[in-house]
Amino acid sequence: MKRIEAIFRPERLQQVAAALDGAGFHGFTIEDARGHGRAADKVGEWRGVPYEMMVTHKLVITVYVDDDEVDGVVRAIAAGAATGAVGDGFIAVSDLRAVYPIRAVAAGENGNGGTAPGAGTSAPVVEPGPAAT
């Protein structure tokens, strides 16, 4: 399984969500992020005094998928997030060693009918299968 994280402009969230949905990927997690990159610094104003904003607001979206689904998710996120300007963001893909569905572990299973970790065995947890979010 893979974890796909993308950092992009918050005003592109609707387009990213629609692109993922249209590609058949319905579950994801969103986080607020602040950062500084190559995009031009913005100027703000507080009590009539202008100041340079060193960080910009972005969103981080995380999607968990099987290895063969990576290309579809990356393309969907890129299609939804792209504006063609500096500061559009980036997409990172990471390998996952294991995924633990909380409900299955709490029930003493590992998600594949086996025994959960900590239940007296070292059986592997969830092997790549349906996308988990």
Image: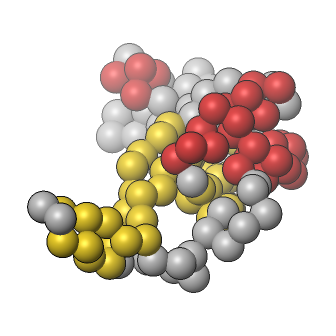
Compared with residue 14, is residue 107 higher up or lower down, i.e. above or below? above
Query: In the displayed structure, does residue 115 sit left or right of residue 93?
Result: left
Residue 132 at x, y percent in the picture:
61, 32
* Identity of the residue drawn at 40% across and 40% down: 117
Compared with residue 11, is residue 18 higher up or lower down, i.e. above or below? above
- Residue 25 seen in this snapshot: no
* Identity of the residue drawn at 35% across and 34% down: 119
Residue 114 at x, y percent in the picture:
55, 28
* Identity of the residue drawn at 37% across and 71% down: 43
Query: In the displayed structure, does residue 82 sit left or right of residue 45?
Result: right
Compared with residue 43, is residue 34 higher up or lower down, i.e. above or below? above
Residue 89 at x, y percent in the picture:
63, 64
Along the line of sight, which residue is nearer the eye, 114 or 76? Answer: 76
Along the line of sight, which residue is nearer the eye, 46 or 113? Answer: 46
* Count of numbered circles on the image: 0
Query: In the displayed structure, does residue 107 sit left or right of residue 99?
Result: left
* Identity of the residue drawn at 73% across and 28% down: 18
- Identify the image's colour scheme: rainbow, by chain, secondary structure or one colour: secondary structure
Along the line of sight, which residue is nearer the eye, 47 or 87? Answer: 47
Instruction: Tell me the quarter of the image containing the C terminus.
Output: top right
